[in-house]
Image (cartoon, helix red, strand yellow):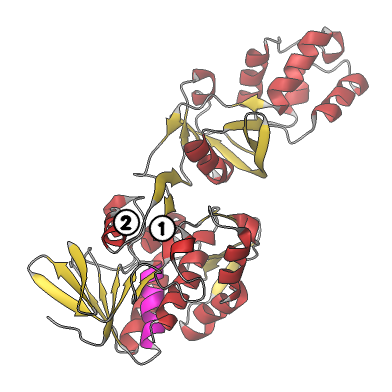
Amino acid sequence: MSEHDATVIIGAGAAGLMSAIWAARTGQKVVVLETKAQAGKKILISGGGRCNLLPSALNENDYYSNSSGNVIKRLFRTWPLEQVQMFFEYEADVPLELEGETGKLFPVAQKSIVVRDALQQELINLGGEIKFNHQVTDVKKMNGEFVIACGNEVVTATKLILATGGKSVPQTGSDGFGYEIARRLGHSNLPNYPALVPLATNETLLTNLSGVSLRVEWRAEKDGKPLEVGNNDLLFTHHGFSGPAILDASHWVARDKADLIINFTQVSAEEWRQRFIDEPAKTTQSVLSDIVPARLATALLKKAGVKHDDRVGNLPAEKRKGFIEVICNYKLAITGNRGLEVAEVTGGGIPLDEVNISTLESKKTEGLYLCGEILDVIGRIGGYNFYWAFVSGRLAGESTK
């Protein structure tokens, strides 16, 4: 099959569908090749099936890349957050609502499928085509055209957009082959690692707390130097730790082998020292249980080697210091992470300096464009990675004209 003068997109996820829509809006013939039997499988499972589509506010610190923050800012200026929201509400007819406590935007329908279907329908309305069950096995650039092998079928195209995703949740179709295609077309690949991924521990004192959740302050540090700090919910699991705080911090641990320090009480060590002076008759159990769940309070007391009925005013200075250290600066004993099978995104990927930032066209192969998770950009949890997919997809698609 030949698609001469067509733009072909590999991957019908969030970035792929958006890039296809904007390429089609320029009047081109657009064909999307999708490995799976349906589009947007990651969209469908996002937000527990509700689809946390976008954040309600952001800045460049919500993203991590080996490139500079100025590059990220330039990219996001091409399609500001409020304009993406308007695209969904007024062009794709997907009204959104704010979840006040988290600042996340969800479709009013609270169903991921409405987002996927709206993007797919918009593409079809523009004359675009999605070919399902088309597993790309090879791509070559020959005589100015891309020759794309899909099993026994060959597709040719003048422009090619790689929107294959990374390696995370591979059963959705993001099996990492996009990196190999990019390599064959001249690109390098920063080492891949799981990001937004639960972390594991063998500290039974904490795995026994499975199901306990609370808001914490966290700090990622390497060799005693802070890398990032945050404040969000931590969830104890049978394997270790999850929840937004852990997922946001996980890339520092997975990539840099950073330490993760938790303040379970969100109260500073100085404030605790003063509290012990002000309330000397209170027991250790009661001062902690006022702030953290009782099961966690019991575990922290055990870790600190303090009895639950000790009065804080009677604690020897060293015991008091150790107790405060445990509740304010608990270094999690992390043994690993749950891996790419369950990670929400893949870190690493194609360096941004290998694409033209104004168009996302490859500097290695003319007519090749890259967008979404395959590039070296990851966002924190809360719709940030969808926003990156949409911004980069639009820029790549529009630039193929």
Residue 216 position in % (x across, y down): 66, 38
| Residue carrying label 1 | 350
- Within the image, what quadrant is residue 104 found in? bottom right
Specify the quadrant of the image occupied by residue 259: top right
Classify 232 as above or below 369: above
Quadrant containing the C terminus in the rendered view: bottom left
Rate crowding at label 1 as few (under 14), some (14 to 19) or many (20 or more) other CA atoms within 10 Å.
Answer: many
Q: Nearer the viewer, residue 95 or 231?
A: 231
Is residue 216 in view?
no
Q: Answer with left or right where residue 150 lies relative to residue 290.
A: left
Q: Nearer the viewer, residue 280 or 192?
A: 192
- What is the CA distance from the residue labelled 1 to the residue labelled 2? 8 Å
Residue placed at 30% from the left, 59% from the top?
178
Q: Mark 2 points at which residue?
A: 179
User: Tag 1's secondary structure?
Assistant: loop
| Magenta stretch prevailing secondary structure | helix
* Amino acid on which the number 2 mark rests in the picture: Tyr
Residue 54 vs 2, above or below: the answer is above
User: Which percent across, then down, holds residue 387?
Assistant: 52, 66
Q: In which quadrant of the rendered image does the N terminus lie?
A: bottom left
Instruction: Give the crowd class for mark 2: few <14, some 14-19, many >=20 residues within 10 Å.
Output: many
Chain-order first, disc 1 or disc 2: 2
Left or right: where 301 falls relative to 165? right
Taking the magenta stretch, the answer to whether it contains residue 186 is: no
Query: Contact (CB < 8 A) between labels 1 and 2?
Result: yes
Q: What stretch is highlighted in magenta?
A: 15-24
Residue 151 rendering spot, x and y as whole percentages: 10, 65
